[in-house]
Image (cartoon, rainbow, N blue to C red):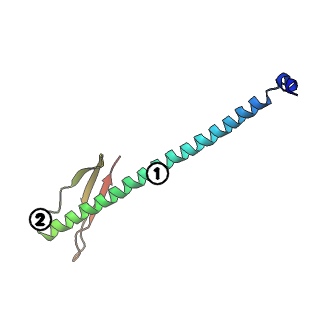
């Protein structure tokens, strides 16, 4: 019986192992790329949320300055948050009679 096994050199096991290795590698690469894309998406969502809160901070600063009788704020504000530069451009709108002045705040970030 062992003589038959020693003389059986068809290579079926080698081919099977190579195919299984290839399948496992493809699955591992797929899972890794999925995780990388999820991390990138999470980073984009984080930056957009930080930009939104930065715009709210600028808006509250404008409102506090107007309430205290100061000039609203400069036309552009830059701030570094977590190593990322957020830039807010403030555009003063034309107020309707009897209404407060509208402001457009545009936040840019990389």
Identity of the residue furthest to the bottom in this view: 98
Taking 56 as reference, is 39 above or below it? above
Q: Position of residue 81 (x, y in %)?
A: 28, 51
In the rendered structure, which disc, 1 or 2, sits on the residue that comes first in sequence? Answer: 1
Q: Are marks 1 and 2 in contact (CB under 8 Å)?
A: no
Of the residues tagged 1 and 2, which is closer to the observer? Answer: 1
Q: Position of residue 110 (x, y in %)?
A: 35, 46
Q: Position of residue 19 (x, y in %)?
A: 72, 35
Residue at left offset 44%, top offset 52%: 42
Q: Secondary structure at mark 1?
A: helix
Q: Position of residue 105 (x, y in %)?
A: 29, 59
Instruction: Count neighbours of disc 2 (C-alpha within 10 A) and say few if under 14, some if 14 to 19, many if 20 or more.
Output: few
Quarter of the image for the N terminus: give it. Answer: top right
Taking 70 as reference, is 20 above or below it? above
Residue at image mark 1: 41
Residue at left offset 67%, top offset 35%: 21
Q: Is residue 100 visible?
A: yes
Q: How many marks?
A: 2
Q: Is residue 92 visible?
A: no
Residue at image mark 2: 70
As drawn, the label of residue 103 is: none
Residue 65 quadrant: bottom left
Q: Secondary structure at mark 2?
A: loop
Residue at left offset 45%, top offset 47%: 40
Real-space CA distance between mark 1 and mark 2, rounded to the nearest whole angstrom: 40 Å
12 vs 81, nearest the viewer: 12
């Amino acid at each position: 019986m062992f003589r038959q096994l020693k003389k059986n050199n068809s290579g079926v096991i080698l081919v099977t192992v190579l195919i299984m290795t290839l399948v496992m590698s493809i699955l591992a690469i797929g899972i890794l790329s999925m995780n990388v894309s999820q991390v990138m998406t999470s980073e984009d969502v984080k930056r957009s949320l930080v930009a939104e809160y930065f715009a709210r901070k600028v808006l509250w600063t404008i409102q506090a300055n107007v309430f205290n009788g100061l000039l609203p704020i400069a036309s552009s504000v830059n701030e570094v948050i977590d190593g990322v530069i957020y830039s807010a451009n403030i555009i003063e709108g034309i107020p309707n009679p009897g209404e407060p002045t509208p402001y457009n705040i545009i936040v840019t970030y990389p």
